[in-house]
Amino acid sequence: MQPISVYRQQKSRPPGKQLVAAAATFCAVVALLLLLPGEQAEAKRTAIPLPLDITPTEVERFNPAVEAISPSDHWQEAKVRSGDSLSIIFQRQGLSASDVHELLTGTELTRPLTRLRPGQELAFHIEGGKLLGLKIKKSEMTTLLYERAPDGFQVSELNREPEVRTRVTSATISSSLYKAAEDADMPERLIMELANIFGGVMDFVYDVRAGDHFIVLYEELYLDGERYKAGKILAAEYVNRGRSYQAYRYTDSLGKTGYYALNGESMQKAFLRAPLEFSRISSPFNPKRLHPVFKTVRPHRGIDYAAPRGTPVYAAGDGRVLEAGYTRANGNYVVVQHGSQYITKYLHLDRKAVRKGERVDQRQIIGWVGATGYATGPHLHYEFLLNGVHRDPRTIVEKLPKAKKITATEMSQYRNTIHGMHLQLSTYAVQAGYRSPTNSSIDAG
Ligand SMILES: [Zn+2]
């Protein structure tokens, strides 16, 4: 096994998204100025990094509008300390007990005022010793605003829109998918999503090889110019042993969102290639793992997936639970019928999550990996039957039901939608050295 270092490259602002990004930035700036306490807004106005693709002139053109709707800087920020009550906080602001009383009796919504948490951010608007407004930050996204009104205090909720940026990242697999994604600074949820997207075409336990690589184009949500959390995967490519699989997020004319290959075929296949959650499974390149339990090669009607106890086991496809039981040999096991032709079996489960007769959806958890029955260690024994005959699900792909495809009438719409993303993936692949410029076209995986 040759050591392969992980390749990393990041671009927070790929070409083709510039207008969107500029617009998003502008909106975010306006949103920030609207929602933040005045003084903070002052600070933030300079703190927000200018996106590279907005020229100073454009910013200047935006600014007058921003000034016009920006609140004046009469907000004083405060933070709840441990042991604080509203009275103590008010005292620190030079307000009296009667101000507390006035606020509490002047509003219906007292709960946020009486249930303040240490560290929670507040802002006061005080004029002439009189409380005119109070802001309570509920979450990164939501702030409550209490404003003095003729008959008490009026409450409104200020919601912020995160700025959406797209990011491209990539990694080459050296030990495991999970490790590679970690090196690519991808959050765990995104790794799982990536694996889910390609779960119909790839077995991430047995197919993944050192030297495989992936490129992911995804959204990141920013607040105050700082990364807040990851959003959706927009497009991704996984190159497995030299073969490229690409997936593009697309919402069809019926409003249904899914991932599709370049040729319009859905990435969601009738069956998962590996019916378990595999992001945590390590060292997938050890050939011995093919038979982790029975060390000798023997007639074996299923596939064994060695995995940590408690790893979720998924229904490989939509179906109905035919059996969910226990035998001395199988341990806890589940059998699922898919249509009239297919049956899948899952043995040695630590626990079952379904009952006989229950309908299950693909990727629904039906149990957890264990070592019940004849098993020397935790693993999932998985069997796949076509018309009552055991088959290797990894080699009979062509006998599996065809995946749904984007309709012919919608195909041009689809191509238009994904064109930019396709270009981004291709450009990135060349820049990252995954593909030569002359060979930048991609098979419709
Ligand atoms: Zn087995």
Image (tube, rainbow, N blue to C red):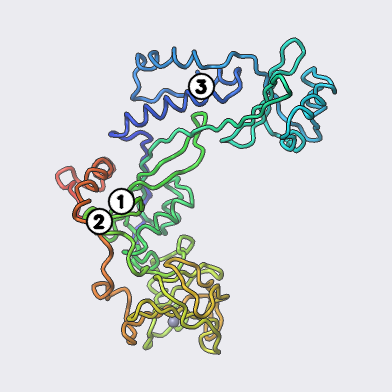
Residue ID for mark 1: 252
Give the residue displayed 53% in from the left and 22% down from the top: 33
Quarter holding ligand 1: bottom left
Instruction: Tell me if 445 is positioned left or right of 303 in this view.
Output: left
Q: Residue at x 46, y 63 (%)?
A: 282
Mark identifier at residue 95: none
Residue placed under numbered mark 3 in the picture: 47
Residue plotted at (55% across, 85% down): 326
Q: Nearer the viewer, mark 3 or mark 2?
A: 2
Q: Please count the marks in the image.
A: 3
> x and y percent of residue 198 in the render?
35, 59
Residue type at numbered disc 1: Asp
The image quadrant of residue 83 is: top right
Disc 3 on helix, strand or loop? Answer: helix
Q: Nearer the viewer, residue 173 or 346?
A: 346
Q: Nearer the viewer, residue 49 or 402?
A: 402
Q: Residue furthest top?
A: 128
